[in-house]
Structure formats: structure tokens, C-alpha cells
Image (spheres, rainbow, N blue to C red):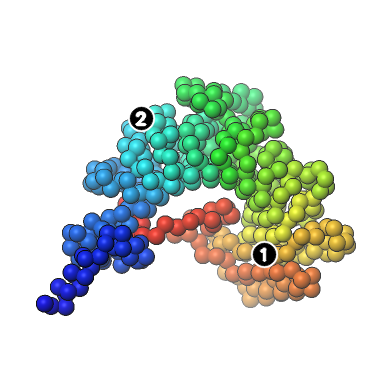
Amino acid sequence: MSTSTTASCSWHSLPSEMKLAIIDGLEPEDINSLSKVDQRTYQACVPSQFKKVTLQSFEALERFLEDVPRGYYSYIEELELCTKTNHGTPVLPRIRADAVISLLSATPRLMKLVLRISGSLDKSVIAPFPYVKNLKHLSITNCGDEVQAPLSERLVVAIVAATRNIEQLSLDRITRSRVHAPELEGVYPCPPLAANDEDIPDDPLLGSELSLPSLLRIPTLRTLTIRDTHLGHAGWATIPVACRLQVLDIGSCYHGDEDFNTRCTERIMAAVGPTVDEFSLTAAVSDTVFSEPSVTPLQRLRKLHITPFFPVDSVVETMSNLAGSPVEKISVQCFEEDVVDVCNALEEFLTLRVERGPEFYNRLQRIDVTVTAEDDVHVVSEEETEERVAAARRLLDFCRDLRLSSVVDKTPKAKAVGGARATISFTDAKRYPVKGRSMTL
């Protein structure tokens, strides 16, 4: 018997569970090579090949539905889905919704879904979400023009509420509905408002109140990220909170100024603060109520993150105003041109910590600075580089003197593929990768 025959017999004699365990441990390119050995091996590789699927356009979604056997959909555990067309020709919301429904209704193992929607979808898209019972991680982004094709908060909240076991939620560029924001009509400057969404059906839990603050009534929610979204609804301060958020990541809204974003951030912090362990800031905090340990809503906050869009001149004031929380770790992301200013601001904060005595940030253990790549890459002079290295060294030395751990990156992280802005959300960095091949169309 030849060596190849012996090897083939040895492989096929293994129990199915052992084969799947071996395949799961392989790199994607190795799984692809193994799947070409023979038909039986190909079938054994199918579950791993379809664990993670990326469909980068509506045309890719159509091809997937047409070419891939429907039985393979059940192996999908992570799905990234975009409804934007490549050719620019509009597709009716109902047609796009039908395609999404066709795929989601056959994915019982789905645990993580990234939806990049160009404009809106027909309300019928809500239908499969109650039956995708393993779905815990959901991200929804409007990848189209918010003015021309807004993605209504009513549709988004209805989808999230229908996802019965949702734990981690990320929303980006969601548009306020006229139903819930009549006070914004006629106001200058007026943010985009979604219309014609009154017919979205009531949710069994939330009823007709499908505004963004109603997300806090979803009891399973543990991580909430909202970016580039108008958060001016007064309901954030009055909604009965049923969730126990552990991670909160609130980005600023480009429709409002710095003071507006600060007010919105503080209102949400006050509502969900008692359970939050980790918080990411884009807007400054000016309310001193957060500085008193006995009254601050953020009684459990241990990890504080500051994003690159945070105003550097507000770093010291904001961290001083958050002194009432038991913060153990501070992470700051900044653009390369802000490295010196950020390091200087952190030095000023540490000086204040020394002056205020042992009760001020008494649990602080670590300060890290990460440099994020910018869209516009410019040549950095040798003098600028030396200045940044010196600022980083001073901060590291100061932390060492105070017996604090610290890491300061002096070079920016690589930009995302395709020239997109590098990831700035701290919650995004917590994705749990699924082993196996990533099926991308």
C-alpha cells in the first residue's frame, strides 16, 4: 500500500469529532488546502469555512444566496453584511430587506452580526431577529448619506429589542426620528431627521417608545457603544433603566458643539453609571458631581478610556471631575500630532494627584498612551520626533516615580485596509475571533 493511501486511510478513519477539532485548529489557508483533498474532506471543512462570512455589498449578498447551499448557512457564527450596492443603482428597501431576511432566518448559530446599511431597510427586516437566539453581539452602521438616506432610530431600536439575548451593541450614525424629536424640526442647525417610520410595529417590551433611550430598558444589554449619533433626547435622564451596563462608549455627535456633547454624555453617565466598569470618553465631563465618592453615579468605574477626538485641553479637568470613581487604569488614544500635548496633560494630572494627596485617585495603577494613525499622513521632522520621544520619556519617568505602570507608543498604529480610519473604539478591540476560514465575497 502506498504512503499516500495509508495517509488517506488514517485521516478518514478518525472520528468526525476529531477531524473537526483538527480542522478548527488550522489557519484559513491550510483549511482551504485541506478541503481540496477529496469530497469527504471538503465536507468536513465546510463548518470551519463558513464560521465567519463577510459580504461587502448587496451584490455579494445576492451571489451568496444564489450560489451557496442553504444548509451551509447554519454554520455561520460571525456575519458582516453590507447592503450598499456597487453600481449605485437604488434598490428598494423591501428587496434588500428580503435578502437579509433570507440569510438571517437560516443562521441559528449566529453569535455576532455586523450590519452596514446604506439608508434604511423595510420594517419586515425585524422578523428573523427573535429567532436568532444565539446572537449576542450586534453592530449597526449607516454607511450611506445620513441626509439623503437616514437610518431611523425606531427601526434600529426595534431590531435590537427583537434580539432577545443581546449583550453587546454598537451603533453608528443612527438618525433621530421625527416621532421622538418634534422639537428639532425647524431648529437651526437642524440634524437630519428620519420620517415615515410611524408604521414600525410596537415591541412587546418597549411598546411604541422606540427612541434611543429605550435601549436602556433591555435587561440583557451589557456593553453599549454609540458614535456619530444625536443623543439629545431628554429621555436618557428619565427612562427606567433595566440593563446593567458594564462597558459604555459614547462618541461625540458632529451635529452638536462641545458643550452639547458634554451634556449628553453626562446625562447618559448619570443614568447607567452605577453598574459601569469601563467607560470611553469623547466629550469632556464638567459636572463636579462625579468627583465625590459618596455621590458619583460611577461607583464601579475602574477603566477610563479617552479617544483621539477628546479635547486635549480638557483632559486634566475631566479626570479631576471623575476622581470620585475607583479608577485603576487610564488609557489615552491620540493622534501623532497630539502626543506632546497629551503627555504634558497627563503629567499635569499626575502633579495634581501628588498635590491632592493619597485619597485622590488612590487606586490608580496604570496609564497608557496609544498613538492612532491619521487619514492625512504627513512627514514628521526629526525635531518633532525628538520632541515626542522626550515627552513620552518624561511621562514614563514620572509614572515610574509614582510606582505606576505605563506604556507610551511613540509611533502610530497601522491604518485599516482600504485607507479607512484606524479603529478608535476601545470596545471594538474586544472582539473574540472565531477560528476558521473567513468567507469574504
Which image quadrant for residue 273?
Answer: top right
The 10 Å Cα crowd at callout 2, few under 14, some 14 to 19, many 20 or more, is: some
| Disc 1: CA contacts within 10 A as few (<14), some (14-19) or many (>=20) | some
Question: Residue at image x 49%, y 46%?
Answer: 137
Using the rendered image of the protein, determine whether residue 141 is visible from the camera's viewpoint. Answer: no
**In the depicted structure, whether residue 370 falls above or below residue 151:** below
Residue 334, image x, y percentages: 64, 60
> Which x, y percent locates residue 371?
61, 64
Q: Amino acid at mark 1?
A: Asp
Query: Is there any visible trace of residue 198 in the rendered image?
Result: yes
Which label number is shown at residue 407? none
Q: Quarter of the image holding residue 103?
A: top left
* 197 or 158: nearer the viewer: 158
Where, by quadrant of the figure, is residue 31 drawn? bottom left
Q: Circle 2 — which element?
A: helix
Q: Residue at x 55, y 40 (%)?
A: 220
Q: Between disc 2 and disc 1, whose residue precedes? A: 2
Residue identified by numbered label 1: 368
Q: Does the CB distance between marks 2 and 1 fall below 8 Å?
A: no
Rendered image: mark on residue 94: 2
Task: Assign a secondary structure to mark 1.
Answer: strand
Q: Position of residue 189 (x, y in %)?
A: 63, 33
Quadrant placement of the N terminus: bottom left
- The residue positioned 67% from the left and 64% from the top of the image is 368
